[in-house]
Amino acid sequence: MEYLGSCLCGAVQFKVEGEFESFYLCHCRYCQKDTGSAHAANLFSSTAKLEWIKGENNVRVFQVKKSNHIKAFCMTCGSAVPNVQMEGRLLVVPAGSLDCTLDKRPDGHLFISSKANWDEALETVPKYQRLPNEE
């Protein structure tokens, strides 16, 4: 399988060739901080290959001290982009960075003991096609 992706500003573009073994929604405090949301949504592969199409020199990697938490991002827009971890044995791809359809569904939620208190029964919250004042 081939997956294409990019950052928000388009300075970084990439291709992933291969399959993702897992897809997790992580609710740890690190993932909440680095996404600004309730959780991160990351795809994992030990066999897929990452190819930078454009902007590899615009990618920076940050690791939280004394942790295994790593985030790669575009220096221009701050969007999360793929990174290789565990001495090249694991590819981590933010699901939202893909520009193509992803058929894989999440395999589960991680670190739910850190779950945001407002992240409950979200299916009951009103849904809008656009901004509420535009409907």
Image (spheres, rainbow, N blue to C red):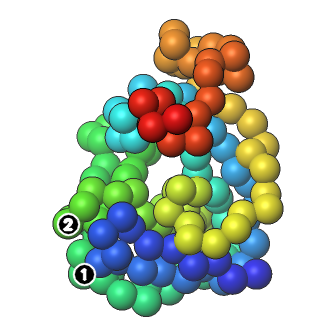
Q: What number is the disc on residue 25?
A: none
On the rendered structure, is 2 left or right of 12?
Answer: right
Asked which quadrant contains residue 100, the reply is: bottom right
Viewer-side residue, 131 vs 90: 131
Q: Amino acid at mark 2?
A: Thr
Query: Residue 31's x, y, as percent?
Result: 44, 37
Query: Residue 60's x, y, as percent?
Result: 26, 65
- Circle 2 Cα neighbour tier, 10 Å, few/some/many (<14 / 14–19 / ≥20): some
Asked which quadrant contains residue 115, the reply is: top right
* Front position among marks 2 and 1: 2
Q: Is residue 38 visible?
A: yes
Mark 2 vs 1: CB contact within 8 A: no
**Residue 89 higher or lower than 3, as above or below:** above
Query: Residue 12's x, y, as percent?
Result: 35, 77
Asked which quadrant contains residue 56, the reply is: bottom left
Label 1's element? helix
**Residue 50 higher or lower than 37, as above or below:** below
Q: Residue at x 74, y 45 (%)?
A: 106
**Residue tagged by mark 2?**
76
Q: Residue at x 43, y 44 (%)?
A: 68
